[in-house]
Image: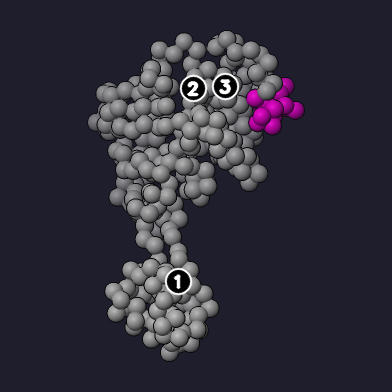
Amino acid sequence: MITLRGLTKRYGEKTVVDALTCDVEPGQVTGFLGPNGAGKSTTMRMTVGLDHPQAGEVLVGGKRYAELRHPLREVGALLDAKALHPGRSAGKHLKAMAQSNGIPSSRVEEVLATVGLSDVAGKRAGQFSLGMGQRLGIAGALLGDPGVLMFDEPVNGLDPDGVRWVRQLMRSLAAEGRTVFVSSHLMSEMQLTADHLVVIGKGKLLADAPVAEFIAGNSRTTVAVRVPAAGERAALEARLRAEGGSTHPGEPDELVVDGVDVTRVGDLVHELGVRVHGLAERTASLEQAYMELTASSVEYGVSA
């Protein structure tokens, strides 16, 4: 478990992380979301002792990172895939990490195989593509077989097959009971990967909830009904408004209904004898819900 308690970080007069308090639980993938500059990377850096808060604390399994005797065995982190010696081979890079924490060298071969880099273990890391560098960074995070894993933009530079592999890896690690904390700007991928979300904006906690609960609480569910006959569509629209709903045009021949659930819309269609070519409930995507919640927290946005 990762425990954040009143975590505060300032650079000069700017507060980057503002009294952030939450728990990142084991056994699930927790997505860490927020606009650019929200404080996500700073929070992760403070978790592994690369930065220090002015107030509050971060605990990993009840201890500060500096108190861990063999930190790589307890916390694995991919924060910057380029943070390595470019002239050192992938295998030697991982062996140096292993020796620093008393990890058997045989583990290096295991993690290289896990991330698909066995054939290039002798290649200099500085010659790796962005995607290969990400895989090597993930191998480093897995090296000590830790119970807590943190990944900052882990799919950056990966092809679609690599993105799917990372998604499956994250979920399998969580299924083993590990704490998996993942920062990403790819909302569609987070919707497929994460079980729980921690969302921050301008350093403050905006949401701490399961994915489905977050989407439901920050968006509206609508009903789409396609009625090919204009007269019948008008009659249904009038009845829906009488029921307290609102409507607006969608695709050709379609009404998008807000305020009346899909079951009631179906009942009204039946009562009026209206012929329909489609009736479906539409829920918002994670991206839509996220944009709704963080609209006022964007610091570096541009005009649409």
The residue beneath circle 3 is 145
Where 20 sits versus 98, above or below?
A: below
> What is the residue that sits farthest to the left in this orientation?
13
Amino acid under disc 2: Val
Element on which disc 2 rests: strand
Residue at 26% x, 23% y: name it.
55
Between 129 and 9, the residue placed more toward the observer is 9
| Disc 3, SS | loop
Q: Residue at 65% x, 25% y: name it.
A: 111
Residue under the image location 45 percent in, 55 percent down: 285
Instruction: Say which residue label 2 marks.
Output: 75
Q: Is residue 123 magenta?
A: yes
Classify mark 2: residues with Cα within 10 Å, few (<14), some (14-19) or many (20+).
Answer: many
The relative height of residue 20 versus residue 160 in the rendered view (above or below) is above
Q: Quadrant of residue 203?
A: top left
Q: Which residue is mark 1?
A: 224
User: What is the x, y in percent for residue 148?
Assistant: 48, 26
Q: How many marks?
A: 3
Q: Is residue 123 shown left or right of residue 35?
A: right
Image quarter (top left, top right, bottom left or bottom right) of the N terminus: top left
- Judged from this view, the residue extending furthest toward the bottom is 231
Magenta residues span 111-125
| Amino acid found under the numbered disc labelled 3 | Asp
User: Mark 1, residues whose alpha carbon is within 10 Å: few (<14), some, or many (≥20)?
Assistant: many
Residue 159 visible in image = no
In this view of the protein, which residue sits in the foreground, 227 or 139?
227
Dot 1 and dot 2 residues touching (CB under 8 Å): no
- The location of residue 81, given as percent across then percent down, is 55, 29
